[in-house]
Amino acid sequence: MSKPAAKPRKSKRKASSSIDDSDASMESLATALPSPLKNLSSSKNGRKRVATALLSLLPADATKQNAAAKKLASAFPLVIAELEARSKALARANESEGTRLPIAFRFDDTVINMPEECFTNVLKFLKGAEVVRSSLVSKVWLSMSRMPALWERLDRSAGLTNKDKKLNMTELIRLLGRPQFENLKLLSIPYKVKLGKSSIKQIAKACPHLETFDIGYSCGNVHAKDGDFPDIAMHLAQLTSVRFDMWNATNYGIQVLSQAMGDQLLDLRIKGDCITNHYLSDAALSVIASSCSSLKQFTYEIVTYSSRYYRSNLDSLSGAGINALVGGCRCLEVLELKNTKQVTKSDFTSLLAMLDGSGGGYALREINLVGLPFAVKGDPFRIEDVDPRNGMSAWERAMDDARNPDLSSDSPASDDE
């Protein structure tokens, strides 16, 4: 039995309209559009009028469930994506054109062409956010503002903020992939961006020269976990400085980090947290002292949001831990402590005695104490009684006034007031 002849397949694609038909349809569409949509650049057409005009394209009783309304709403992300793509393409074109133009400064009838190296050195005096603003001057300045030599740090001062909470780790990795950040040495994870095992690997791949990693130390709502520290030490090969808070991190994680990095760790800055009751301990300092003999700067601060959160019985850092740290890290140059209430004046008296008896065997040259009723100053070091509020920011002073209303009026003014 013979098979019936196969029917010719119908093409699933609709026949494309000719260019003339497309142009004609676009013209007819433009004619049918409400007047606010015909001239969006007009100052009279604010966003409310434009929104009203778009809604007039839908049936009067249309809601979010209406098929036409869904099509209209789904078109907006495509429009935004297209505008962003055009913006990036224009920026690349302008940057490419700027690289071919001389760096010229005109003074009346005189034109001075500056060498690229000299102009780069001038721009190095600007912060990152200022460099971004300077890129608006011309195509040449745009091209120069993206030189990798200008972008060795990326933090809040460089304009990396996330106040609108739209930046996530995926977008951050994409940002770090730009050629201008190929020599990045300092990275501060911005507000509300979550760190994880895979993201640490991606950051290490995008920033092979990274030396300083800030996770929540300078910017709130970013917290490192104990499980992050082994990956940080493993994948960030050039890392010498780590800064983080102890919202999620514990003394165990700090010990793991110290042992994993060893003598490679030169700068360690930690913020203890009163809300989660995570405080640095003498045991952790002893591990740091035995593992990181090349440490040059150590900073520890207890963040005290309110006196009701602070638990003195959990704050176990004492003079014994400080002495162990300085004794084991003879290369330590800067020691900073803030609100370490269990460290006393007698602890530093014994520390200075140890330094004096070493015959210059320690590199310690600076001791900064904030929130304590004494300070260590001078060369050679000496202990002086001071107002414990010295060195506090205005916000910290206000919080201290709220905790001690009877004492705030009697406190002498600090030098910076």
Image (tube, rainbow, N blue to C red):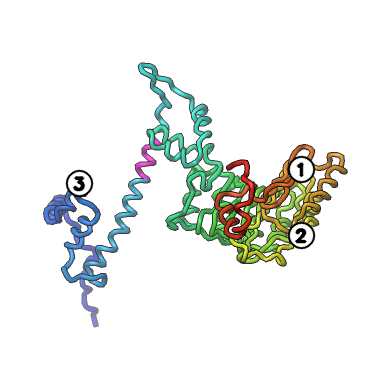
Location of residue 350 with respect to 196 vertically, above or below: above
In the image, is residue 198 part of the stretch drawn in magenta?
no
Marker disc for residue 282: 2
In the foreground, 409 or 355: 409
Mark 1, residue position: 364
Q: Secondary structure at mark 2?
A: helix
Label 3: few (<14), some (14–19) or many (≥20) C-alpha neighbours in 10 Å: few
Residue ID at (21%, 78%): 4
Magenta region, residue range: 88-97
- Kindly tell me whether residue 239 is visible in this rendering: no
Decide if residue 67 is on the left or right side of residue 96: left
Marker disc for residue 42: 3
Instruction: Confirm or deny contact between disc 3 and disc 2 (CB under 8 A).
Output: no
Report, in whole angstroms, how far the alpha carbon at label 3 lies from the one at label 1. 66 Å
Disc nearer the start of the sequence (2/1): 2
Residue ID at (44%, 58%): 165
Disc nearer the start of the sequence (3/1): 3
Q: For the N terminus, which image quadrant?
A: bottom left
Residue kind at label 2, given as amino acid type: Asp
Q: Which quadrant of the view contains residue 279?
A: bottom right
Location of residue 379 with respect to 159 vertically, above or below: above
Q: For the residues carrying marks 3 and 1, which lies nearer the camera in this image?
A: 1
In the foreground, 340 or 125: 340
Q: Which quadrant of the view contains residue 32?
A: bottom left
Decide if residue 407 is on the left or right side of residue 18: right
Residue ID at (20%, 46%): 42
Report, in whole angstroms, how far the alpha carbon at label 3 lies from the one at label 2. 67 Å
In the foreground, 356 or 85: 356
Disc nearer the start of the sequence (3/2): 3
